[in-house]
Amino acid sequence: MIFVGDIAIPYKESIKLKNLPPSFNSKQWFANLEGALIDNSLENINERAVFNDKNAIKHLCSQLNFTSFALANNHIFDTGSFEEIVSFLVKLNVRHC
């Protein structure tokens, strides 16, 4: 299992994965989702809030085997709604705690 720290990805193209060891693809990944999940993140890019773009997280989960996210952090309520975050993760079949 691979544990990652805080993730805050404002738009899909903001992260590029390069040269990861092949063994990383077979591991389960766990990270702290630092901030809410929102649509239309480019409209919020200048706000003083920490958030994740839904499409970026969906893309990340399709590239790596993210099986779980922690949601307990100081930015989870900056934007969006907690219920929407949980609903989105359930649709992705990604656990949360």
Image: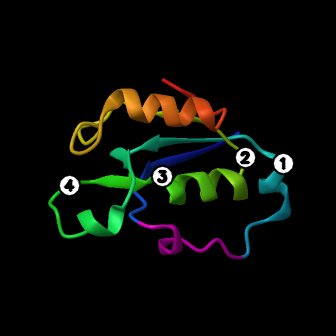
Instruction: Report which residue position mark 4 lands on.
Output: 49
Task: Tell me the residue that label 2 is attached to.
Answer: 65
- Amino acid type, callout 4: Ala
Q: Name the residue beneath numbered marker 1.
A: 26
Under mark 1, the amino acid is Ser
| Marked residue nearer the N-terminal end (3 or 1) | 1
- Which of pointers 4 and 2 lies earlier in the amino acid sequence? 4
Q: Which residues are magenta?
A: 11-18
Residue 83 vertical position relative to residue 27 in the rendered view, above or below? above
Point out the frontmost of discs 4 and 3.
3
Of callouts 4 and 1, which one flags the residue occurring earlier in the amino acid sequence?
1
Q: Pick the quarter of the image with the N terminus.
A: top right
The residue tagged 3 is: 54
Q: Nearer the viewer, residue 49 or 25?
A: 49
3 on left or right of 36? right
Q: How busy is the neighbourhood of tag 2: few (under 14 within 10 Å), some, or many (20 plus)?
A: some
- Seen at 55% across and 35% down, the residue is 89
What residue is at 58 percent from the left and 29 percent from the top? 90
Quarter location, residue 59: bottom right
Q: CA distance from mark 4 to mark 2?
A: 27 Å
Q: Earlier in the sequence, mark 2 or mark 3?
A: 3
Three-letter residue code for mark 3: Lys
Q: Main secondary structure of the magenta part?
A: loop
Neighbor class of circle 1 (other Cα within 10 Å; few <14, some 14-19, many 20+) is few
Figure check: 33 above or below 20: above
Q: Badges 2 and 3: C-beta atoms under 8 Å apart?
A: no
Toward the top, the furthest residue is 97
